[in-house]
Image: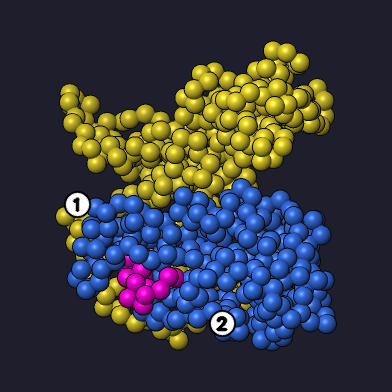
Amino acid sequence: MADLRYAYYPGCASQEITKEANEVTRKVAERLGIELHDMPGANCCGAGLITDYNYELSLALNARIFAQAEGMGMDIMTICSTCLMVMSTANRDLKKDPELLRRINALLSDAGLTYRGTVKVKQLLWVLAQDYGLERLKKAVTRPLDRLNIAPFYGCHSLRPSSALGFDDPQRPWSLEAVIKTLGAQAVEYTGKTKCCGFQADLVALDTAVGMTGMRLLSAKESSATCMVTPCPFCHINLDNYQGMAEKKISKKIDVPVFHLSQIVGLAMGMTPVELGLSRHLVSAEKILTGY
Amino acid sequence: MKTKFKIRRSDPLKAEPYWQAYSVEVKEGMTVLDALLKISEGDDPTLSFRRSCRSAICGSCALTINGFPKLACSTQILPIAKETREVTVEPLSNHQVIKDLVVDFTPFWNKMEKVTPFLLPADETRKEWVIKKEDEKAIDRAQKCIMCGSCNAVCNSLDVDPNFIGPAASAKAWRFVGDVREGHRKKRLERLSGEHGVWDCVRCVHCTEYCPKDAAPLEAIERLRAKAIEEGVVENPGAKHVLSLVDSIKRVGRLDEAAMTFKTLGFLRSLGMIPFGLKMEIHGKLPHPIIFLAIEGMKEVKKIYSAVEKRRKKG
């Protein structure tokens, strides 16, 4: 069995705007016996934007995070797909090219840091589906979610680029559906679950962004989903916070509550809507959770 | 092995596209293009599709095979047929269908033209220009593009905004912007940073994932963005967005969402976000910059920034 201790990297979004995801992940992990060790010195991964500025700076900032995890003797677990993608891509490049690793370590040397290239980066979804395991997860379920038709929304960065992530199948992914079914709920099949939520264009091309958000939600709704779940806080921002704007853009009422992955796990373990921080969501889940 | 092919067909004279099934005897080594040729030479000469070189060089035969874009000529049938039992073949998405599997490439070529797909040398009189290996490496992947349209077919931004420049033309643009001999770099980057330009990419990573030649269009887009900022083309929301995060990490080690929104949108457009902000505040979602704490070890982060800056200045 895998060592269930991780250097915990919630990511910037989940320390602020989606902090309910962070709080619930901590509670769920504690109940499941997954040890999450804080990284108070961890910097932002750059969210891809630092790559748009200077790739070496992006690699150096990520190598600093990896060096910290290396010092803790643990792999990293994040709850953000974009952090996962950015860190995994940097890690892939640093691991496959010793000369590049040397160049980046030279940038870290003034700060007294070195990355040896030994850390793995995972996200909560992978930890549940593989390290913790679905059979064990099933045993932790005290309240099966059998009344929920959940649309799994992977978005982009937990699947692509597969050359850096290498966990799930980018064309026919299975992990999120597997977790949903393990919790006793139905996983809804619909078009667009592996497509983009639009988040990265929110501040640059809002129309394009919310257009995408609307398409994903509408597709799920039309396939009779009563709610959606995503492993990524950025997807959550668009699917939940921007759902009103998306409704206006596509001129259709959607009203589909969106959960963080940790929240549906918590729900199946008997946690209350208050414990799950659901009041922080803009689209209310009240009507689908009567009785929970 | 008998294999079922389900082909998405369209006839301009009929209103709706429809599926037609064919059964093809498939032998080891046969490609999807071989099967299409077999169908059109035998069962059904009316089936239309494009092909030319049969060697994954010409870029004519990109199709949606079992849901994702692939070159028909380099896609073996047996491995996919064993997995999914049947093979579905559709025209490329994000393109208008002319007939059956043939799509209209006019918008594709128009976008290529928009990025001026040829070198505009800085010095036309210079007879010889020795290219260093690392200079060639910078544009090497973008040069692999065979203009098959696979990346545009899966691009999520193009799906919503057909005017978006798209990954294929962006890769082509980088091939020249990144060329050491190029003389109109800044002008090109100014044009690419405009409306429907490279900043409208949502980083969905479909282009790089499904490119059959590993041309990595997203990498080209990232490099174009970085080059634009380096050349001082920063008066646009995309560049401002990036620079505000560069600054935010340098100050506090992480994302300062409130400052970032303000710096990206500017004062007036930020005012427009107030109703949304109030809604967010009700749910406790509005980031509060005043209480924003820096991470531990900020000294290290600052040292990394200055080491990178030093190296950049050295070139």
Vertical position of residue A120 compared to residue B187: above or below: below
| Chain identifier matching the yellow colour in the rendered picture | B
Q: Which residues are magenta?
A: A62-76
Horizontal side, residue A150 vs residue B233: left or right? right
The mark found on residue B315 in the picture is 1
Mark 2 or 1: in front is: 2
Name which residue lies at 54% across and 28% down: B74
Q: Position of residue B148 (x, y in %)?
A: 53, 30
- Kind of residue at disc 2: Gly
Tell me the distance, in whole angstroms, between the alpha carbons under discs 2 and 1: 50 Å
Q: Residue at x 55, y 59 (%)?
A: A158
* x, y percent for residue B111: 51, 34
Q: Which mark is residue A33?
A: 2
Q: Is residue A63 magenta?
A: yes
Q: In which image quadrant can residue B220 be found? A: top left
Asked whether B196 or B219 is in front, the reply is B219
Q: Label 1 is placed on what type of residue?
A: Gly
* Protein chain holding label 1: B
In the picture, residue B84 is in which quadrant?
top right
**Element type at marker 2?**
loop
